[in-house]
Structures are given as structure tokens and as C-alpha cells.
Image: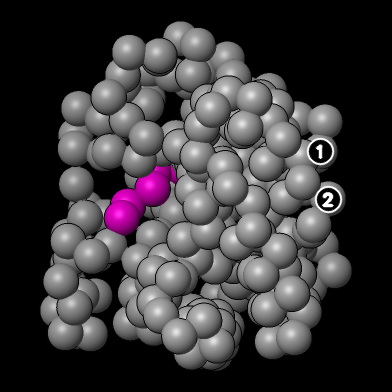
Amino acid sequence: MEVKRRIETACERAGRDPKDIILIAVSKTHPPEKIVEAVEAGVEHIGENRIQEALKKHEELKDLKVKWHLIGYLQRNKAKYAVKIFDAIHSVDRESLVDELEKRASKLNRVIPVLIEVNVGGEESKHGIPPELEVLKKLVFYTLKAEHLRLIGLMTVAPYVENAEEVRWVFRRLRELRDRINEELGSEVLTELSMGMSNDFEVAIEEGATMVRIGTAIFGERNY
Ligand SMILES: *Cc1c(COP(=O)(O)O)cnc(C)c1O
């Protein structure tokens, strides 16, 4: 797979081990058959951004050996479905959502890995909490208290730019925030940095990404 080769090349440049990067193939708008093909080509993680669409695909592909990641905005009233089918939720951005996810995960007796989404680029169209240490710290501590959620890291969606170098600072900032939080906690609680998409994943890897979310570079243009 071309994308895997590109990940390896970026890792070489950054002196990192490709095994430390989780490739999440973002299959939104693409049919279940495409997911099966990707898994046959070695993909082990799938990303979806809409609950309704994910539920349908998950139902059809229940027996497929693959991990499901929710990477899109989550409404509180959909939390009960999210905790049922997803192996990780990348879009936690408010206390009320933490409460609802905790309640629903506890009912299912599941512990769900979650990431906090940070709007580093500050675009109004994007979700996530502001990239301010105090604001982030508060949500981190709040999430850590939820017994059925396991906070594993931070996630961001960088602004779309032609030249990925222009958003290197976004990825660097997320890493710095992660490191600051770990310092505060006195241990490496937040291990993951979910950052980098088709257009900018190589730069994200150079800046420390541990999870890259790649759609179009794997599946082609979206079928909206
Ligand atoms: C769609 C999407 C991606 C993948 O985007 P591509 O540019 O197609 O790689 C990654 N992350 C999120 C949150 C998305 O919504």
C-alpha cells in the first residue's frame, strides 16, 4: 500500500519506528466492500465520522477483524451508539459529553479509549476545545475521573492548506500541549497524538503523530 510506504519514509526522516504509528483508514462515504478490500491489504483500523453511517457498516462487517475509530463530532444523544460499536473515540471536547459517554459505557460495562479534540488552528468551522493549557487541563482532569473512559491522548484536525509545512506549527503545538499535560500528571498518561490526514500526514509524523487518519489517499475522492 502506497500510504504505508509514505509513512515508512516519513518515519525514516524523523528517526521513528513505523510500528509506533497507527494507520487509521478513513472510510466515510465509501461502501463496506471498500473496507473489506482495505483490511485485505493490511489495514487494521477504520475511521468513520458519522454515527448513522458507521452503525450500518459495522452491522454489515461485525465479523471483520478491524478496530473502529470515531473521528467526527459526537452529539450527546448518539453517545449510546458510539460506545457500542467504537473501539476508540477521538472527538471528546466537552464535559457534558464525557458525562454521557461515561454513563453509557458503564451501562455496557465497557471501558472506552478516548482522545480529547483540540482546535489548535482556531477555525470556527472546526470542533474541539481551544488550545489553552488551563482549559485543556480542566477537561483532562474531568475525563480522567470517568471510570469507563480511558484517556489516551489528544487529537486535532489542521486547517486545510496546499503546503503542509504551513500547518507544521499546529502539530507541534498539539505535541507540546500533550507533553505539558503529562508533566502536570507526573507520568506519560497521554501517549497518543491523533493528527495528520491525506494532505499533511508526513509532517504530522515528523512532529510526533502516533495515529494518522487517512481517507482520500487510500480510498480516493469521497462519494458525497
Ligand atoms: C475525513 C477525515 C479525515 C480524512 O481526511 P482525508 O483528507 O480524506 O485523508 C481525517 N480526520 C477527520 C476528522 C476527518 O473527518
Give the label on residue 156, or none.
Answer: none
Task: Say above or below: 224 vs 97.
Answer: above
Q: Is residue 99 left or right of residue 87?
A: right
| Location of mark 1 (residue) | 76
Q: Quadrant of residue 78?
A: top right
Residue 151 forms part of the magenta stretch: no
What residue is shown at x 20% (from left), y 27% (from top)?
40
Q: Evaluate whether residue 126 shows in this view.
A: yes
Answer whether labels 2 and 1 touch (C-beta < 8 Å): yes
Residue type pointed to by label 1: Arg
What residue is shown at x 58% (from left), y 48% (from top)?
147
What residue is shown at x 81% (from left), y 38% (from top)?
76
Q: Evaluate whether residue 163 shows in this view.
A: no
Question: x and y percent of residue 26 in the render?
Answer: 46, 42
Q: Is residue 61 left or right of residue 160?
A: left
- How packed mark 2 is, by other alpha carbons closer than 10 Å (few <14, some 14-19, many 20 or more), is few
Residue type pointed to by label 2: Ser
SS label for mark 1 = helix
Q: Looking at this view, name the residue that lies furthest to the top.
A: 60
SS label for mark 2 = helix
Q: Which residues are magenta?
A: 22-28
Question: x and y percent of residue 217 in the render?
Answer: 39, 51
**How far is disc 2 from disc 1 in space, using C-alphas?**
8 Å
| Location of mark 2 (residue) | 96
Q: Quadrant of residue 127?
A: bottom right
Question: x and y percent of residue 186 in the render?
Answer: 45, 85
